Image (tube, rainbow, N blue to C red):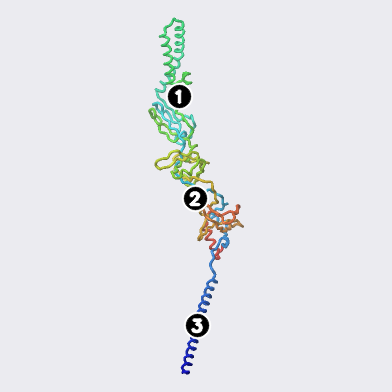
């Protein structure tokens, strides 16, 4: 019995020893696993991480003056420009109605001669053509006859009045003399008005001079837009003879849609291009805004005075404009001066040294774009005297990448 008890105690002791050994072995395995993972993480953390290269890390690019000229590199100072806040509008060039004239014949006559051709500049009162017809001569003769008869009728009226007042003349004779005078006076007034419309000198007729040719005179300063007659042609009354236009007061007539009209005010500036002159940007200032909507399209006429040289501008030319609706200005560069690399934007600062141009990339923030220009914001304080490349930004970027790879010019 004692022997069996001892054996059982020995078995329990061995069993406890085995459990202790298993526990120690498991603990060691867990320790080595944690250590291995920690070492691996440490190796990952110690690996070099590739950093984004900013503008200060990029190498300076240098290009010879000769090559810069071949590339047509444009260098300049970055200035402020109104980019944001505008309304797009299309329209045409127009002139006010008082600056256009259409001449017609007052009476039927023959074209004796024409003194101008289309495109000629004319002054107000200048003779454009001469008309002739027997009726014109007869009209002057009738006026001269009525004019000379006027003095006789006046004397007769006064004589009959004296006789009537003295009681020796009849009232009927006095009334007839008075009526004849008034009738002749009315004929004179009517003929005088017609002759003035024909630009015939009344004074010369009263002096006995009859004019065989009648002058057609320009009512305004301007240019002959169209000649609708030929020498020797007979024209009826109201026949269209000439079109004259004065382009001195030519202006931009733009159509602004209903949803934009609340943004438009007098005095706002407009930048516009003429379709037939694509490389020329012009400026104008709003002086009048229409008060009624056109039905097709639903838009209002906006009139703007053109600034600067109006040469080669003709009424009817189609224009595309941008009305500046605020006065906010930002630094701006042409789109060709800005390059994107990843999520960053760069421009290139330029400096001339020893017959070479040196370019340094400068990181910027881009804002709004308009008509080939982009507003920018400098990340650091801007050097007001510094010059920058205005084009070929992608070429300069490619050159900077070559220089980073060890290739130099």
Badge 2: residue crowd in 10 Å (few <14, some 14–19, many ≥20): some
353 relative to 239, above or below: below
Residue 23 is marked as 3
Residue 119, percent from left and from top? 46, 36
Q: CA distance from mark 3 to mark 1?
A: 133 Å
Residue 115 appears in which quarter of the rendering?
Answer: top left
Q: Which residue is mark 1?
A: 196
Mark 3 or 1, nearer chain start: 3
Q: CA distance from mark 2 to mark 3?
A: 76 Å
Residue 370 is marked as 2
Mark 2 or 3, nearer chain start: 3
The quadrant of the picture occupied by the C terminus is bottom right
Residue 204, percent from left and from top? 48, 21
Most distant residue in the top direction = 168
48 relative to 136, above or below: below
Badge 3: residue crowd in 10 Å (few <14, some 14–19, many ≥20): few
Q: Is residue 310 visible?
A: no
Name the front one of labels 1 and 2. Answer: 2
265 relative to 19, above or below: above
Name the front one of labels 3 and 1. Answer: 3
Q: CA distance from mark 1 to mark 2?
A: 57 Å
Residue 310, percent from left and from top? 50, 40
Circle 2: element type: strand
Badge 1: residue crowd in 10 Å (few <14, some 14–19, many ≥20): few
């Amino acid at each position: 019995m004692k022997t069996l008890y001892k054996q059982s105690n020995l078995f329990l002791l061995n069993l406890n020893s085995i459990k202790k050994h298993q526990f120690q072995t498991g603990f060691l395995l867990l320790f080595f696993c944690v250590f291995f993972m920690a070492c691996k993480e440490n190796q990952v953390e110690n690996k070099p991480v590739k950093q984004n290269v900013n503008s200060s890390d990029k190498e300076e690019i240098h290009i010879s003056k000769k090559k810069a000229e071949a590339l047509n590199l444009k260098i300049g100072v970055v200035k402020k420009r109104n980019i944001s806040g505008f309304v797009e509008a299309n329209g045409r060039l127009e002139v006010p109605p008082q600056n256009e004239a259409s001449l017609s014949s007052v009476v039927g006559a023959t074209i004796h001669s024409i003194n101008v051709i289309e495109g000629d500049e004319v002054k107000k009162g200048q003779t454009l053509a001469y008309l002739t017809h027997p009726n014109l001569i007869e009209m002057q003769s009738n006026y001269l006859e009525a004019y000379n008869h006027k003095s006789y009728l006046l004397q007769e009226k006064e004589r009959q009045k004296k006789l009537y007042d003295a009681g020796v003349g009849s009232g009927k004779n006095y009334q007839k003399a008075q009526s004849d005078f008034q009738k002749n006076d009315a004929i004179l007034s009517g003929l005088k008005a017609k002759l003035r419309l024909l630009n015939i000198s009344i004074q010369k007729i009263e002096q006995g001079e009859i004019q065989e040719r009648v002058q057609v005179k320009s009512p305004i300063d301007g240019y002959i837009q169209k000649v609708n007659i030929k020498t020797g042609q007979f024209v009826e009354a109201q026949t269209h003879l000439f079109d004259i236009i004065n382009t001195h007061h030519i202006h931009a007539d733009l159509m602004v849609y209903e949803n934009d009209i609340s943004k438009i005010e007098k005095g706002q500036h407009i930048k516009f291009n003429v379709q037939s002159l694509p490389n020329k940007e012009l400026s104008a200032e709003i002086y009048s805004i229409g008060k009624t909507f056109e039905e097709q399209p639903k838009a209002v006429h906006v009139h703007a005075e053109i600034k600067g040289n109006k040469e080669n501008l003709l009424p009817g030319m189609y224009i595309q404009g941008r009305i500046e609706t605020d006065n906010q200005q930002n630094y701006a560069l042409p789109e060709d001066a800005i390059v994107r690399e990843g999520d960053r934007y760069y421009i290139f600062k330029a400096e001339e040294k020893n017959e070479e141009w040196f370019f340094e990339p400068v990181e910027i923030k881009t804002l709004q774009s308009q008509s080939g220009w982009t507003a920018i914001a400098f990340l650091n304080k801007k050097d007001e005297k510094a010059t920058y490349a205005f084009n070929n930004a992608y070429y300069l970027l490619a050159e900077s990448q070559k220089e980073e790879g060890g290739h130099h010019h």
